[in-house]
Each structure stands twice: as structure tokens, then as C-alpha cells.
Amino acid sequence: MNTKKFTVKDSGKRENYKSGMRRDLQQGKIRYDLVDQTMLKRWAQHMTLGAEKYGVNNWQLANSQEELDRFRASAYRHFYQWFNGEEPEEDHAAAVLFNISAAEYVKRKLDEL
């Protein structure tokens, strides 16, 4: 790895620990540790099942308004089903996360055109 490509960025402010370790402050940084890991696992499970059924990252082939609309419709449908407790054998909450994420992915692709 070419180490000259990368830098260790920080705010310029330090937090000192009793051990002598020094680190940049956490303030203003995204806190991924606040994301519910159980829901993240369910989303990953949904993605795994989708990859087995449709192919790994098949959803990333989407590149049209029609496909964006399809993800939005699926997100809405799964949200409705999750909200109303329908079909408990399907993880509608994870499906909502997938479809919103996929829709945002396609939106970025369309914006780049």
C-alpha cells in the first residue's frame, strides 16, 4: 500500500488518556456505534437472501427512473405491511431499509448523468 496517498485527518484538538494515549476528539463525527446492530444484522440478512435469489448486488444494475419508482413503491408497500403487522414471516422492516437504500443509490446515479 502506498502510504503517501493517505493522511490521518483530525480536528487539531486532542483528548488525552491516563495511559498516555492521545486521540482526536469525537465531537462532530458520525457515531456509527449508535446504529442498532440488531436492525443492521436483519438488513444484512435481507441483503444476503436477496443476493441468493437475484444475484450478488443485482440491485445495483438499476439506473432508471422506472427502477427508482419501483424501489420507492416497494419501500412504501413494505412500510405499510410492517406498520400494520402483516405477513410476519417476512422482515418488512429490513425490506424498507433495503428499498430506501436502493432508491437513494439510483437517485445518486441519475443525478450524476
Image (cartoon, rainbow, N blue to C red):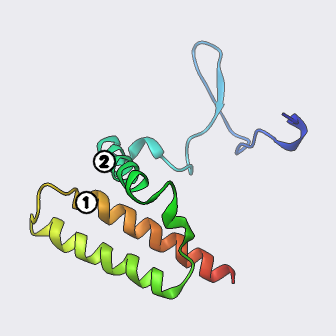
| Residue nearest the viewer, comparing 12 with 57 | 57
Front residue of this view, candidates 110 and 13: 110
Q: Position of residue 96 (x, y in %)?
A: 31, 65
Q: Which residue is mark 2?
A: 42
Q: Write the residue at 44% across / 65% down.
A: 101
Q: Residue furthest bottom?
A: 65
Instruction: Specify the amino acid type for callout 2.
Output: Arg
Residue sitting at 19 percent across and 57 percent down? 90
Residues marked 2 and 1 touching at CB (< 8 Å): yes
| Whole-number angstrom distance, CA of label 2 to CA of label 1 | 8 Å
Residue 41: quarter of image: top left
- Quarter of the rendering occupied by the C terminus: bottom right
Mark 1 crowd level (few <14, some 14–19, many ≥20, 10 Å Cα):
some
* Residue where numbered disc 1 is placed: 93
Residue 95 rendering spot, x and y as whole percentages: 30, 62
Which amino acid type is marked by label 1? Ala
